[in-house]
Image (cartoon, rainbow, N blue to C red):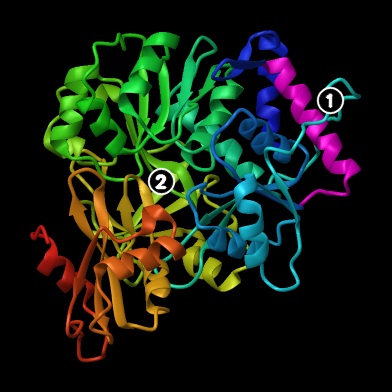
Amino acid sequence: MNVYSLLTDAVRRRGQDVALRYGDRTITYREFDATCAALGRWFSEHGYARGDRVLLFIRNGFEYPALLLGTMRAGLIVVPVNAKLHPREVAWIAGNAEARLILAHGDQVESIRSALPEGHQPTIIAIEDFRFPEADGPATPVAEVEPDDPAWIFYTSGTTGKPKGATLSHRNLVACASNCIADVFAFQQEDRVLHVAPLSHGSGLYLIPAMARGSENIIYDRTGFRADEVIGTVAELRVSVIAFVAPTMIVRMLEAETGADTSSLRGVIYGGAPIHLDHIRAAVAKFGPIFHQLYGQGEAPMTISYLPGSHHLGADDETLVSAGYVRTGVEVRIVDEDDNDVPDGEDGEICVRGDVVMKGYWRNPEASQKALKGGWLHTGDMGRFDKGGRLRVLDRRHDTIISGGTNIYPKEVEDVIAAHPAVREVIAFGLPDPQWGECVAVAVVAGDSGFDEQALLAYCKENLASFKKPQRVFFLDDLPKNAYGKVLRRQLREKFGGTGA
C-alpha cells in the first residue's frame, strides 16, 4: 500500500474543501491530488523512476506538501532535510542518499553543488524557478509499491560518525499515521491544523494523518516561531490543532502577552525534548488540557509512547514527568547491557518493536544490525516503567544535545572546530538552558594564545549550521580524561553546568 493512498478517501469526500492554506493561497483536496499526479507525470517525463531519491532542502511553504507527498505518490523516495543545515552538510547527505534531484532555495544551489562528493552530479533546481506542471493533463494513478519499499529517508545522527538515513517504508508511515489517529490525536474533517514546525520533520509526519482525515492544513508563513503571531493566527483562523511543537515553543506561548481568543484550540501535540513540570502545569492552566505529549525518534518517528491531554489535568508529578503509555501496535522493553529484560521500576535501555520501526539505515548494514539487534530497535535512551505503567525517559545513553527540540550531535560540532589549526583539542557537550532546554557548550584547548572566543564563533559561523553553534565556550589548559585517554564529558557538564560563564 502506497502511503499516499490514505488520502484517497479525503479527496473523494472533501474534493472541493480546502486542503492547504498558506498566507492568502489555498488549494482544495481535488486540486492537491491533481497537482501531485501532475508531479508524478513530470518525474516520469524527466526520466525519474521508482526508488529514485528526491532531496528537499527548502523552508516550509505552499509547495512543500505537494513535493513531500507527491514524490511518494509517484513511488520515488523523498529525502527531506532540515532547512537550517549548512549546505556542506546537505551535500554530504545528498551524496550518501545518491539523490538524483535536489530542490533548494536559489541562494544555496551553488554552495551545495560545490560541496557535492566527486562524481555525484544530481540535478539541482532552485525552488523559486520550479514550476509545477499543469494539473489538467491525464491523471496518473498512485504508484504501486510493496509495503516495505522505502518512502522517506529521515537523516539523523549518532554521537559518532556521519548522519545516518533512517529508512521509513510505506508500511512504517501508514502505521505511524494510523497509530496517531488511534492514540495521540483523532483528527477530524472540521479541524484546522496549524503546522508551525518544519515539514521536514514532525509536522510533515503529522500532515499525513491530518490529510487522511480531511482536515484543513495551515502552513505557518513566517520565518521562525513568534508566539504572539502564532496565537494571533489561532484566533484569526480559528485553529483547532497545532501539529507538533517543541517544549520551548510552549514556553514562548506562555510568555506571549496577548489577549487573543484561543478557545478554538482542542489539541497541541508536543514532544522532542523533556518539558519542565512548572511549564506544562502553567500551560494547562492557561490553555486547558489540550496538550498531547509524544515520545519517539527518527527510527520510530513520533511513535513510541504518548500522554493524552486528559491525563495532564490535575496530574501528579510522576505522570507529568513521564512519556506516557506505550502506543497501539508498539512493543517496548527495558533491557540491561546484556539485552535481558529488567523488572518494572528498574532502569535500562528502551527497546522498541513494531511496524513503526524503520527498515534500517540507508546503505549502512553495520549500523542497522547494531540498532536492530534481535529485531528490536535499541533507542540509546535510558528509561523505566513507573508504577502506573507509564514509560519514563531518564537520559540518553549517548550524548546528544537537544536544544529547542532539535537534536545536535557533539561529534559534528567537534569535527568542525577540531579542523581549525589553532585548536589542539575540543569536546562538545550540552548544558541546561532556561529557554532552549539545553545549549551547546564546548571546551577547547588552544595551541595559539591569540585564538579566543570571538575567533572561534566567527569560524563556526562560516562552517556550522547556526543552531549548532556553541553558546558557551570554555578555554582550558587540558581536557579531563580517564586512564584510557577518553575525555570525561560528564565531568565537564558537572563542572560548568551551574556557572553562568
Figure label count: 2
Residue 243 painted magenta = no
Quickly name the residue at label 2: 296
Where is residue 440 shown, x and y percent of the image?
Answer: 28, 59
Quickly name the residue at label 1: 134
Q: Nearer the viewer, residue 34 or 440?
A: 440
Is residue 291 shown to the viewer in this render? no
Where is residue 406 shown, x and y percent of the image?
Answer: 38, 49
What residue appears at the point 54 percent right and 35 percent down from the top-left corner? 60
Give above or below for 192 relative to 321.
above
Q: Quadrant of residue 158?
A: bottom left
**Amino acid type, label 1:** Glu
- The CA span between labels 1 and 2 is 39 Å
Question: From the viewer's perspective, is 402 left or right of 8?
Answer: left
Element marked by disc 2: strand
Q: Which residues are magenta?
A: 28-51
**Amino acid type, label 2:** Gly
Please identify the residue farthest to the front as the structure is shown.
Answer: 450
Element marked by disc 1: loop
Question: From the viewer's perspective, is 410 left or right of 110?
Answer: left
- In the rendered image, the quadrant that contains the N terminus is top right
